[in-house]
Image (spheres, rainbow, N blue to C red):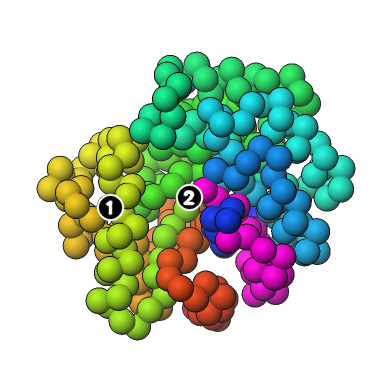
Amino acid sequence: MDLGRFGIWVLASDVSANAARVIESLGFGALWVGGSPTGKLAEVQAALDATESMVVATGIVNMWRDEATGAAAAYHQIQGRHPDRFLLGVGIGHPEATAEYRNPSATIVGYLDELDAAGVPRDHIVLAALGPRVLELAAARTAGAHPYLTTPRHTKMARTVIGDGPLLAPEQTVVVSDDRAEAQRFAGDFLARYLRLVNYRSNLLREGWSEDDLAGGGSDRLRDELILTGDATVAAGIEAHLDAGADHVAIQALGPHPEGAYRALAAVLYD
């Protein structure tokens, strides 16, 4: 399954047939349906129906919210209609969002076992992964890893952990705006939500950031590394993931005008 070098990550609630067609027409290899889409994957089906060859991936189906049997049934339905164009991204989510959250490693293994038993090919599954243990599971049990809210330093570490073969497809958030104050506001508001979640905090602290960096909406330095702004910075930051070992970068564009952002991104990435 060829995702190309670049894809676009979009919240499931914002996925539409028109958005999918625009993203494909601009040359992006994949559309990532993010924000824990439901296991029935109606958004995936609609995006695939509206396009011709682009891969559609989930980023991610939440293991606590949707049972593996349901995700497998949806996978097989989509695979039958659009062979080899759907990558099933799954993940454990966050303890702050799920009262039942417990023993994440065992839950991941059990969920992947159920997908295996239901006949979902491992090379059509990707696992949300941040820390070394889950990255190792991604390499051993799926096509590879889909880290979220990370830097190229994390990408380099992840490639070392998973080895040369598995897919490594990090998400990278960007703000396409000439107004730095506006871009910083978007970045701060976005990060403030995520920096309250222990999984992301632990990952960033493990990378070497301080508690002061993680306070509020994040330090200026942290915001600049996690949320890329400005055409040249965006292009260089995305390429830095590829240089660090990523196969594909899933780009999430913040701001009120997503289609304009996708066109601007295509212009700087495919010039």
Q: Residue furthest left?
A: 212
Q: Which residue is mark 2?
A: 170
Count of labels in the image: 2
- Magenta residues (range): 14-35
Cβ–Cβ below 8 Å for labels 1 and 2? no
Pick the front one: 256 or 132: 256
Does the magenta run of residues contain 30? yes
CA gap, disc 1 and disc 2: 20 Å
Residue 262: image location, x then y, percent: 55, 73
The residue sitting at 39% across, 70% down in the picture is 175
Q: Look at the image and tell me whether residue 151 can be seen.
A: yes
Q: Which residue is mark 1?
A: 192
Position of the C terminus, as image quadrant, is: bottom right
Mark 2 residue element = loop
Q: Amino acid at mark 1?
A: Ala
Mark 1 residue element = helix
Residue 46: image location, x then y, percent: 75, 56
Of the two numbered discs 1 and 2 on the same chain, state the one appearing first in sequence: 2
